[in-house]
Amino acid sequence: MATRTRKKAAPKTFKDAYQILKTNAEELQNANEPDIDNLMNTVEQSIAAYKVCQARIEAVQQALDAAFDEEVAEDEPSQDDATETESSAE
């Protein structure tokens, strides 16, 4: 009778998810013969880890975009400031 490995819970952090991806990739690359009985578990675990990494990267990208947009908006003179500068120059 074939033994089934227990499904592990999805990783919660980018670091944990990245480590899973790295470990699974190394195991697959270094295996002389793939463990077909465990391959589906490895693939499912890797997909879950990839999704965690992808979601975290997207969240960081959005935060950086928002911070950059905010910084640019602060550096640009507002419409009122531009009007006042033009009026005082005359």
Image (cartoon, rainbow, N blue to C red):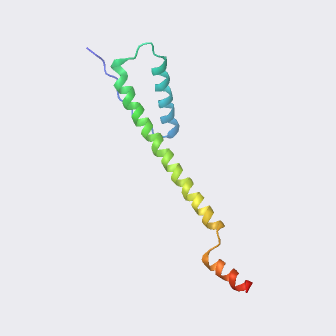
Q: Quadrant of residue 41?
A: top left
Q: Position of residue 61 (x, y in %)?
A: 53, 50
Q: In the displayed structure, would residue 49 be above or below residue 38?
A: below
The answer, for residue 10, to whether it is visible in the render is no
Q: Position of residue 32 (x, y in %)?
A: 45, 12
Give the residue displayed 59% in from the left and 58% down from the top: 68
Q: In the displayed structure, would residue 17 be above or below residue 42?
A: below
Give the residue displayed 62% in from the left and 74% down from the top: 78
Give the residue displayed 44% in from the left and 36% down from the top: 49
Left or right placement of residue 54 versus residue 35 in this view: right
Q: Quadrant of residue 76?
A: bottom right
The quarter of the rendered structure image containing the C terminus is bottom right
Left or right placement of residue 31 versus residue 41 in this view: right
Q: In the displayed structure, would residue 22 be above or below residue 53?
A: above
The quarter of the rendered structure image containing the N terminus is top left
Residue placed furthest toward the right? 89
Residue placed furthest toward the left? 1
Q: Position of residue 28 (x, y in %)?
A: 45, 21
Give the residue displayed 69% in from the left and 82% down from the top: 86
Residue 80 vs residue 66, the one in the foreground: 80
The answer, for residue 29, to whether it is visible in the render is yes
Q: In the displayed structure, would residue 23 be above or below residue 76?
A: above
Q: Position of residue 45 (x, y in %)?
A: 40, 31
Left or right placement of residue 2 versus residue 61 in this view: left
Q: How many marks?
A: 0
